[in-house]
Image (cartoon, rainbow, N blue to C red):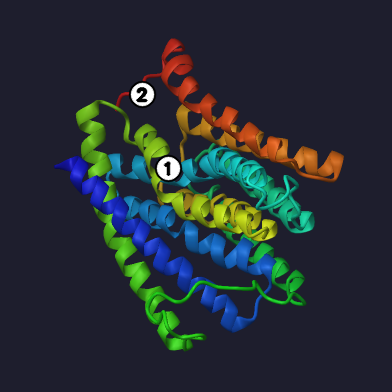
Amino acid sequence: MTFLYLFLSLVGIFIAAELFTNAIEWFGKHLDLGEGAVGSVLAAVGTALPETSVAVVAIIAREKAHTEAGIGAILGAPMMLSTLAMFITGAAVLIFSASKVRKPVINADYQIVGRDLRSFFLVYAIALAAAFIPGRVGKVPVALALVLIYVLYVRRTILDSGNSDGQGHVRPLHFRRRADFPHIKIVIVQLIAGIALMLIGAKVFVDSVTVMSASLGIAPLVLSLIITPIATELPEKFNSIIWIRRRKDTLALGNITGAMVFQSSVLPAIGILFTPWSLDPHALISMVVALLASSTIWAEMTLRKRLSPYSLLIGGVFYALFPIAVFWVLPMMGYSVKG
């Protein structure tokens, strides 16, 4: 029965994310925002909402197992985005180019993507350092700094996108599929519906992960690091593949890198404020893997002034390193995955 609840909660979260993402695109259309702002801010935050809801609901419960599941949701998302999501995006470029839909060259606005990655390095390094600060008092300013940095990042992104022509074609609003330009009130109603459904799904998901971790003998943090991102990152992967096929590379990559910035600043800030934020080796390894994987992409953009789909494929290698480290290397060093 636990597996059924877990599956149903994931279905609910996915439907909610689709409602929210679709509405947030129309919200950006009403505000006449450019590609950079829509991809790196609105779409990124919208598709990051499942992980956010899981983390917040888990942490609010204030139980040890739930808190571990919440931290796993927080840290698993940046790792999954910088590795598996990038791998899938690179594979999509090669597949669509092989079918003559597009060229095997990534034509993205590297100023936007580069800014996203630099911001990610900064906030995630700060979040990592916060784990080594003793006591809660010294960690609170770090959490506030992370939120402030993200606010400044959003402001800069919107200002830089101010002269853009918008994000182009947007799928029909689900609540008004026949409307060419749905009213802003209907857009907001769909946003609220998506959030409500997502919170319900997140509550069921957290409870299911906690029960499953106990039955499998695996720590909730480890299980959440693996399961939560795979399930909740589907919107980013799906949207990016669609945009890659349509040759909207800035939207495709910005959707991922923008989510990385949000999930490496706002979500860790929540974790720092409402949990002890004392990370074990499993959590620390996930953070190191995310930083190394994204460094590879940033290095090619900086040194070669281009981005190859093959560089994105390297993310798959880094993704494979995490379970190897967790289930093989760390147990050899005396760190168990059992809860």
Outermost residue, left direction? Answer: 1
Residue toward you, 285 or 130: 285
Amino acid type for the residue under numbered disc 2: Val
Residue toward you, 136 or 330: 330
State the residue position of label 1.
230
- Checking the image for residue 337, the label placed there is 2
Estimate the x, y position of residue 123 in percent, counting from the top left: 63, 49
Amino acid type for the residue under numbered disc 1: Ile
Q: Is residue 67 left or right of residue 212?
A: right
Outermost residue, top direction? Answer: 332
Can residue 321 be seen in this snapshot? yes
Q: Residue, x 70% and y 36% (percent of image)?
A: 311
Q: Residues within 10 Å of mark 1 (few under 14, many from 20)?
A: some
Residue toward you, 146 or 201: 201
Helix, strand or loop at label 2? It is: loop
Quadrant assignment, res 210: top left
Residue toward you, 311 or 209: 311
* Residues under numbered marks 2 and 1 in contact, where contact means CB atoms less than 8 Å apart: no
Estimate the x, y position of residue 300 in percent, counting from the top left: 79, 39
Can residue 145 be seen in this snapshot? no
Q: Residue, x 63% and y 35% (percent of image)?
A: 313
Q: Is 11 rendered above or below residue 21?
A: above
Q: Is 71 rendered above or below residue 199?
A: above
Q: Quadrant of the N terminus?
A: top left
**Marks 2/1: CA–CA distance:** 19 Å
Quadrant assignment, res 200: bottom left
Q: Earlier in the sequence, mark 2 or mark 1?
A: 1
Q: Is residue 206 left or right of residue 14?
A: left
- Tally the marks: 2
Q: Is 263 rendered above or below residue 297?
A: below
